[in-house]
Amino acid sequence: MSKTQRLNDYAVRWDPNDRGGHVESFFLKANDPDGDRAVWIKFTIYSPIGGVPTVGEVWAILFDGDGEHVAAKETYPISEMRLGPGDVGLALSDCSLEPGHTTGVLRAPDSTELRWDLRYDSSVNPLYPLPMEWMYTAPFPKFKTLSPTADTRFHGFVEVGSTRFEVTDWPGMQGHNWGRAHAERYAWAHCNVFDDPGDASQEGAIFEGFSARIKLGPITTPFLTLVKLVHRGITYDFTDVTCWLRASSTLEHTSWDFVCVKGRQRLIGSLWTTPDRMVGLTYRNPNGDLTYCLNSKIAHCELRLLEDGATRINLRSHAKAALEVAVKETDHPVKMYV
């Protein structure tokens, strides 16, 4: 893949002349390899139907499984957003993101300041969940997702109030999604840190999955599930249409379980956490509806790949997985932060 094609993965898709509604996010997460701690940062463009007022948003969370989570969000007029060459890279106020580098400072509702400066290799390990390239430009599906960098290492620092965390070789990723609206109900998960560091086969393993119910006019589909697992340089791809029809998915507020089947292979996955290890976020849709994202970057993950009924791969991750569950209802057990 050429450098130009890779940069396009990072390019802003929002069209200022499009009044049909648009939401787009560039996000990254990094896990502390030595503790139940992670950082999540997101830059969002939100354009309602009609196009006014389109805004830019920056979000940041420090997940701390042993202490208190801290979450912040700030919103800016879209006129203040600055784009890089070729619409790659964006900046809002004191926050910026370009491939390989992000800096910023935000203030949480309780006035705690979050500050960061992080660098990472953005040229490696892309992952494309949609099975066909045309799906990234066609009207269907309405919501696109890809990971320009699905496995990398972060360096720099994160400050929360007066506490500074030195970031050295924190494993993480950067993702990019966009579309007309968030899916009606969905789970997104990612993991690139698995237990048993003495087993070299675990190094470089990457899992990413997405399961969503999509609204097509008056009809809401069953869960459509797409997952990929990379292990020892081999990609196990459960994203084509036949996999959609054979997959099963169970989604709760704090967990996602799935079974995907392709040929002789079956991938069984479980991701779970507890409400206190999640942060509730309010996402706006271009039509004015709200989606509640129940977000954890310190969730647990178990994956088992079977071939002809025999287990070929068995992976576990303690408190190093990303799990996001998006719902419409407000009666969930997760505390809303921003």
Image (tube, rainbow, N blue to C red):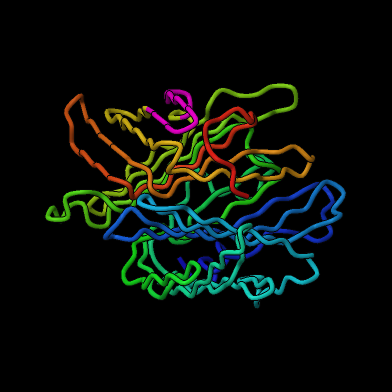
Determine the image quadrant of residue 63: bottom left
Q: Residue at x 60, y 27 (%)?
A: 331
Q: Residue at x 47, y 50 (%)?
A: 128
Estimate the x, y position of residue 9 in percent, counting from the top left: 55, 62
Q: Is residue 250 magenta?
A: yes
Marker count (numbered):
0
- Prevailing secondary structure of the magenta residues: strand
Q: Residue at x 63, y 62 (%)?
A: 58
Estimate the x, y position of residue 44 in percent, counting from the top left: 65, 58
Name the foreground residue: 64 vs 75: 64
Question: Is residue 284 left or right of 269 when viewed as pictured?
Answer: right
Q: Residue at x 55, y 60 (%)?
A: 60
Question: Is residue 316 left or right of 262 when viewed as pictured?
Answer: left
Estimate the x, y position of residue 238 in percent, counting from the top left: 39, 37
Query: Over which residues does the magenta segment extend?
Result: 244-258
Estimate the x, y position of residue 195 in percent, counting from the top left: 21, 48
Question: Is residue 284 left or right of 161 when viewed as pictured?
Answer: right
Where 85 sits versus 209, above or below? Answer: below
Where 163 sits versus 18, above or below? Answer: below
